[in-house]
Amino acid sequence: MGHIFRNDIQEMAVDSLRRYLAEAIEPLYNVEYRDRFVPKDVLQGVMRALTDFGLVSGVVSEAQGGLGIDWLTGMMLFEEIAATSADLSVPVAINTFGASFLAQIAPAHLQDRYLPGLLSGETFVSIAVSEPDVGSNPAAIRTRARRDGDDWIINGEKTWISNGAYSDFLICTCRTGDAPGQLTHFLLDRTEHPYEVRDIHKVAFNSQSTAQIFLSDVRVPHANMIGEENRALPNTLSLFERSRVYVAAQGLGIARRALEEAVRYAGERKQFGKVLAQHQLVAGQLADMATKVDAARLLTYRAAEMVDAGLPAEIEAAMAKYFAAEAAVVIARQAVQIHGGNGITREFLVEKLARDSLLIPIYEGTSQIQQLIIARGLTGVGAF
Ligand SMILES: Cc1cc2nc3c(=O)[nH]c(=O)nc-3n(C[C@H](O)[C@H](O)[C@H](O)COP(=O)(O)OP(=O)(O)OC[C@H]3O[C@@H](n4cnc5c(N)ncnc54)[C@H](O)[C@@H]3O)c2cc1C
């Protein structure tokens, strides 16, 4: 797709970020640390550079210490990260969501203390919703916070928590009453209110942290409550509306990179005396892949523009996330197929992209949950 949607400033921002990513991130994440955990100090160096480009810092207003970039431009920059390294895109996304969340609903004293580190790339946040028995239905959360004078005492277990090992603090969703919706957010500082972190090994995304978090009698002051008591569910759902646009851009980035790798390979590899691209069945696959990449981008841009316009975007964000995530899986698999046997070796990036793609339809609401959200928008009734 040409870039009729990007203005000159966006085009320049994307270009200069691309140069940095090609020089610094491609060798770091796709060669040196491919499938290996990137240490926190290395990631801090990367995050410092990325916040200068407007990643993370962009989503917070200038008055609150950020750069005040619109959601669409931030998402365009983020697509570049995902197209270079899906692993790196995870801490960038989580810090972005955490910063945006704090800036919108945290009390001023928590903003003053925790936003600057996120905006400069020094610190890392985790957003802890999921639990061993609670995935698609966050209303069933069991991690319990009980009031004890001026404090709350938290007990429970969270799982699949991105940034877990890197985290300096946690935005933790806890049950504060027995009714399904009685959930409340608390900020847990890892130094002051220690929690145990255990990393999870996965099929992909092992250059970053996805972790179990154990909370055993963690004492947190009442002042660390974020948002009002029992308002965590609506606040989380409103965060999802925006965060799903970024996860759509993750799928888009993986899909675009897989297409780029397939186009390059199809132009070089010869069989039957001509390059693969000259075989009509390969050309047809490339055309399908390119069409899906552009469709994913258009849905993602639309959802981001609606967020910027302050319009309700639940359905559009769900469509973008659903389509881009599923497209990434199909396109990455086609890219492997076009690489033949080479496609399943570590010598070629498509092997990793195919593994990376599998994770996108799972988090931030599975593909089935997105289908249910879209259908509810059509019929007016939930089929959950
Ligand atoms: C790499 C990664 C990073 C993550 N990061 C975070 C994080 O930072 N913070 C966090 O809190 N969580 C995180 N998660 C957790 C993620 O949000 C959950 O995995 C996701 O919500 C799905 O929950 P589940 O895995 O328990 O699957 P389940 O909810 O058990 O679902 C299993 C299957 O059943 C289907 N299903 C469930 N309910 C329905 C229904 N009503 N109708 C039809 N189908 C249904 C699902 O679509 C899925 O196919 C992460 C997960 C991964 C893989």
Image (spheres, grey):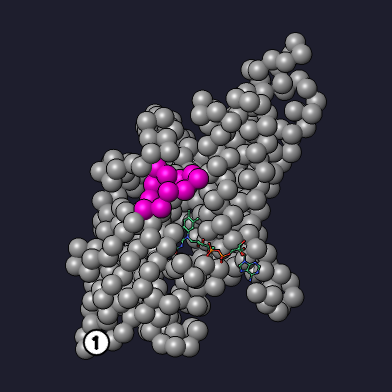
Q: Residue at x 61, y 51 (%)?
A: 325
Residue 293 position, x and y percent, is 65, 43
- Front residue of this view, candidates 167 and 35: 35
- Mark 1: which amino acid? Asp
Classify 182 as above or below 313.
Answer: below
Position of the N terminus, as image quadrant, is top right
Classify 229 as above or below 260.
Answer: below
Residue 384 position, x and y percent, is 65, 74
Residue 39 visible: yes
Side (left or right) of 43 relative to 142: left
Residue beneath label 1, please?
148
Ligand 1 quadrant in view: bottom right
Residue furthest to the left in view is 192
Residue 2 belongs to the span the image colors magenta: no
Q: Residue at x 32, y 76 (%)?
A: 155
Quarter-of-image position of residue 36: top left
Quarter-of-image position of residue 194: bottom left
Helix, strand or loop under label 1: strand
- The crowd level at tag 1 (other Cα within 10 Å; few <14, some 14-19, many 20+) is few
Q: Residue at x 38, y 84 (%)?
A: 176
Residue 119 visible: no
- Front residue of this view, candidates 112 and 266: 266
